[in-house]
Image (tube, helix red, strand yellow):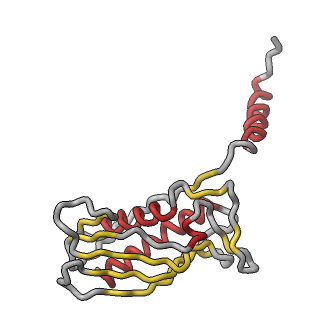
Amino acid sequence: MTKVPPHLLLPALIGLLAACSDGIGPLRYEVPPQAEEERIPVSVGSVELREVSLPLYAELETITVETPGRMLATDNDVLWADDPVRGMTQTLAMTLAEITPAKVAAEPWPFSDGPDVRVEVRFTQALATAAARYRIVGQYFVASPFGERKDVARRFDIAVPYAPGNPNSIAAAQGAALRHLAKHIAREGL
């Protein structure tokens, strides 16, 4: 048996791993959690967040990027780590629970007493744009199931920069955009 000198072993191993990585399949990118110290007072004690509504391209597990020609491109090997609807819904619910004193949960409502309000978010855009900004645009609605407070409807348009060609940066920008949206909902809707 031939012994490989130690100084040649590492480069050979790196070359082998690089050759194998071509066939490892799709890579999944997780939206990283973002710590928030700000607390926002709200006038409700409990909030149910309905499942978010996304455009078709944003519902897909592939990460969609706008090209300079305004076409939407995806790569079947660059995927979100979670189902986009579930992931965005959970991120918004967890962020609202973190930044407000309210009891917050995504639907279905898990508690025996009903929520004070229900929040519904409808995205018309959730996209890594050609301008190197992850942009979310849409409208949210806050409704009181028991009519105890006035219903609210507000629009939003939030853009966060990302590094082009970097899916981790796109995922982080999406997380930051959702955090901005949660703060907007807390301040203006709750």
Task: In this rendered view, identify the residue nearer to me: 166 or 28.
Answer: 28
Quadrant (top left, top right, bottom left, bottom right) of the N terminus: top right
Q: As drawn, which residue projects farthest toward the top?
A: 1
| Residue in view at x 48 percent, y 82 percent | 138
Identify the image quadrant of residue 163: bottom right
User: Height in image: 189 above or below 76?
Assistant: below
Task: In this rendered view, identify the residue nearer to me: 138 or 12.
Answer: 138
| Residue in view at x 45 percent, y 71 percent | 178
161 to the left or right of 70: left
Residue 159 rendering spot, x and y as whole percentages: 54, 78
Residue 166 rendering spot, x and y as whole percentages: 66, 62
User: Height in image: 59 above or below 41?
Assistant: above
176 to the left or right of 74: left
Identify the image quadrant of residue 111: bottom left
Residue 160 rendering spot, x and y as whole percentages: 55, 75
163 to the left or right of 43: right
| Residue in view at x 36 percent, y 82 percent | 141
Quadrant (top left, top right, bottom left, bottom right) of the C terminus: bottom left
Task: In this rendered view, identify the residue nearer to me: 63 or 30.
Answer: 63
| Residue in view at x 68 percent, y 74 percent | 66
Task: In this rendered view, identify the residue nearer to me: 39 or 127.
Answer: 127
Count of marks placed on residues: 0
Residue 180 rendering spot, x and y as whole percentages: 43, 75
115 to the left or right of 60: left
